[in-house]
Each structure stands twice: as C-alpha cells, then as structure tokens.
Image (cartoon, rainbow, N blue to C red):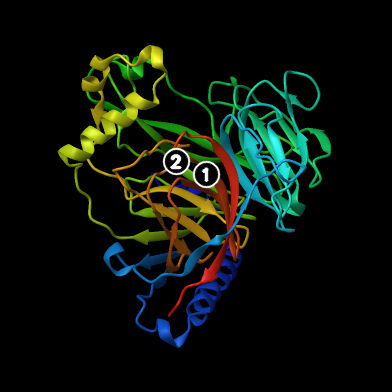
Amino acid sequence: MPDVPPSLRRLTRRGRARSIAVLALAAIAAACDRSPDDADAPAAVVRDSAGIMIVENPPEAQRTRVLHEVDTASVVIAREADGTTDPTFESVLKVVGLSDGSFVALDMAPPHVRAFGADGVARWNAVGRGNGPNELSSVGPLARIRGDSLIVDESQGSRAILLDADGTPLGDLAPRMVLDTAGVRRPVWPFARLGDGSTVGYFLRFSPSDLQGSGSELATMPFVLLDRDGTLPTPLGDHPVARMGRGGSLIIVALSPYVSVAAGESEVVSGWPESEELRVVDTGGSLIRLIRTSGDRRPPTAEEADVGRDQVLDGLPVALRDPGIRDRVMIADSLPHFARLVVGTDGRIWRERFTPARPTGLFARPDSVTVWDVLAPSGEWLGIVSTPPSFYLTDAGPDWIVGSFADELNVQVPRRYRLRAAAR
C-alpha cells in the first residue's frame, strides 16, 4: 500500500517515543507469555525506524505452532425464544460477541439485528427495513463499540443507527459524508469502527472510463477516518480496494485480493493482500507500526483458475449465468498473501490464510478448514487457529470465536465456539 503522507504523521517526538516504548513492552510481554514448551517457536524481530515500529514475522513455512484449538463440542447455536426451534436467516452478514457471552447477528432480512444469549436463546431484535426511525433501507456493516453498544450502517446511503447493549435504539448517528477535493459531498463506505464509534472507510472515486481498454485495473480510493459526529475527517491516503477487469461486462478478477481493514479500540489495521505488510495507524492518521510477514508469490495453477471461474459463475444471479461468461472471467496474476483481517475484543489480530481452492468472496463460507494466523496487538505472531469447515469467523475474544455456519443447503445460522489452549 502507498505510504501515509508525512504531513499526516502528527505525533510529537515525545509522543512517538512513548508509543514505541509501549508497543515494545507489549511485544516483550507477548514473548514472555509463551511457555517453555514454545521455546522452538519462531520469534518476531522488532525494531524502530524513525519512530515507526517494524515487526518482522517468520515466513509461513515456520509458522506451525497451534495457539488454540476450537472446541467443537462447545458450539452454541442460535435458537428462538422457546429454545427449541431454529431461527430463519436470509443471509448472516456478520456476528459480534459481547462481554457477557451473548452474541449479535446481522441479517440481510429484517429484523436486521438479532441478539442471542450465551445459551443461544434469542433475546431481542432491532432495526427494521424502511426509511423511518430505527429503520434502514439496506444494511451494511455491524460494529460493536465501547460498552457493548452497537452500530449498524446503511449500505446504500450514509445513515447509521446506534443501539444500546440491550437493543434499545439510541437514534441515528451523523451522516457519513465528507467533502472530496472538488468540494462535492460524498458518502463514506465504512469498513470498521473504533471503540468510540469513529469509522474508517473510503469514498468512491471511480468511473466507467476506468474500465475501458484491456487487462485489469487496480482501483484505489481515498480513505478517511471520520469521527462519530461526522465533523473531523482525517485523511488516511489513497489505498487499493479491488482489482477489476477492463473491456467487458464482467469486472470481477477471480482469485484476486480485495482490501481488508479492521479496527481495534484506538488503532486501524489495514492490508492489501498482494503486499506482505500490514499497516497500523492511530486516530491522528499517523503510521505507527508496520507488520511484515515474508511469503512466496506464485501464479494460480490451471486447476485453481478453473475453480476461480466456477466460483464467479456460481456467485452470479441465475439470470446472468451465461456459460460463455465463464471463459471471459479474468484470473489474477498471482495469489494473495492472505484473505481477511479481524481484530478481536482483546486487540489480537486474526489474519486468514488464503486458500485458492475455496470461495473467496466477502461473505463466502469455506467448505474446508480455515487457518488463521493470530498476532499479538503489537504485531508479533503468536500461533495459528484452524476453524471448522463451513464456518465464517467474524469476531474473536481471548477464549471464543463467533461467526456464521452454513449447511449443505446454505442455510445459515450464527454460532459461538469456545477456544481451548492447544496441547503441547
């Protein structure tokens, strides 16, 4: 990803030194947290470069230590209030965990936000479909913020609704709008929210002319950090969002990466999966940490390319599944380093390893085990966690994960699993 402009690095020298010291201590604490049995686990190299902490993690071939095992016997499945029937979901877009062990699911169909207790039994519903109070015409991301409050964003617009931890609507937030360089007000598409409800996202800067010609286009967009009141946008620079094919009706490039952004309490973690680097910025837009992990780049095999074409075709509406489209699907030149990022409630960074032989869409449910690299908040690699087949992880805590599970008919339901320490 492009460097954050120097003008955005607004930490004072003293503030930078204090931040680096805190992060270095966090890295040391993460290393000390390992037991003697982990002495052979590869360690990260941490150094400071002009006030920016650089964490060099070992390559994938050395990252084999299992950090947690998913206790599949502990699964908690969402149930209706009577505790005996399964709720019906159209499409579970996201699940987040709360501090009391309960979890909240975002569904494509109304009621869009649905909460379940630690036992899986339904607690409350919120957010209908429409344009009135406590309604949205379409739903985008769901975010848990400080105090277990929740924010659900509109996908086709700039509205967002704030909910208390018990589902009580607290009203709309300020519209997610910023002025571009031409003075035009544009809605911000949110990727993630910090603990105070500030959002990080981008505004669209793309036109049909960008897709003229042949080959592919790497679309870059202006990213901003927008406070909850919508009054103090902080520019984060232009970053890649997706690779698009030129010169045809299809703009999808199979097996291609898409931007991944996640937020902690007061930091934003982002990565372009074609790069070996994760970037961490603070609330002032200053780059404070680079997390690097070396890996081998390789082009997709012919078999992987065929799988990618099939995935694109399967993802299209039935009316558009012209067999001829399959042969026009472009294939990425090389495979991404990783797929997605999730920052857990404890600040740890979960990075999903890319697997070409399974769906790669934003909401695709893998039919095989998914391997995640878990990093300390400081960026040091801690170990791997393998999540069950057909499970799409969207949030994590120190000893749990939540997400959605899809059966063989793609019937989706929220699930919560307990994590247990891996056997040594």
Name the one closer to the observer, 32 or 23. Answer: 32
Residue 179: horizontal and vertical position, in percent? 60, 26
Name the one closer to the observer, 286 or 365. Answer: 365
| Helix, strand or loop under label 1 | strand
Tell me the residue at 34%/69% (across/down). Answer: 64
Report the amino acid beneath label 1.
Answer: Phe
> For residue 268, which numbered disc appears in the image?
none
| Helix, strand or loop under label 2 | loop
> For residue 365, which numbered disc appears in the image?
2
Report the amino acid beneath label 2.
Answer: Arg
Q: Which residue is mark 1?
A: 405
Q: Examine the rendered structure and indicate whether residue 158 appears above or below residue 35.
A: above
Tell me the residue at 55%/26% (across/down). Answer: 180
Q: Earlier in the sequence, mark 2 or mark 1?
A: 2
Marks 2/1 in contact by CB < 8 Å: the verdict is yes
Tell me the residue at 44%/87% (across/down). Answer: 36
Q: Is residue 213 left or right of residue 403?
A: left
Tell me the residue at 50%/54% (across/down). Answer: 280
Q: Which residue lies most toward the front here?
A: 84
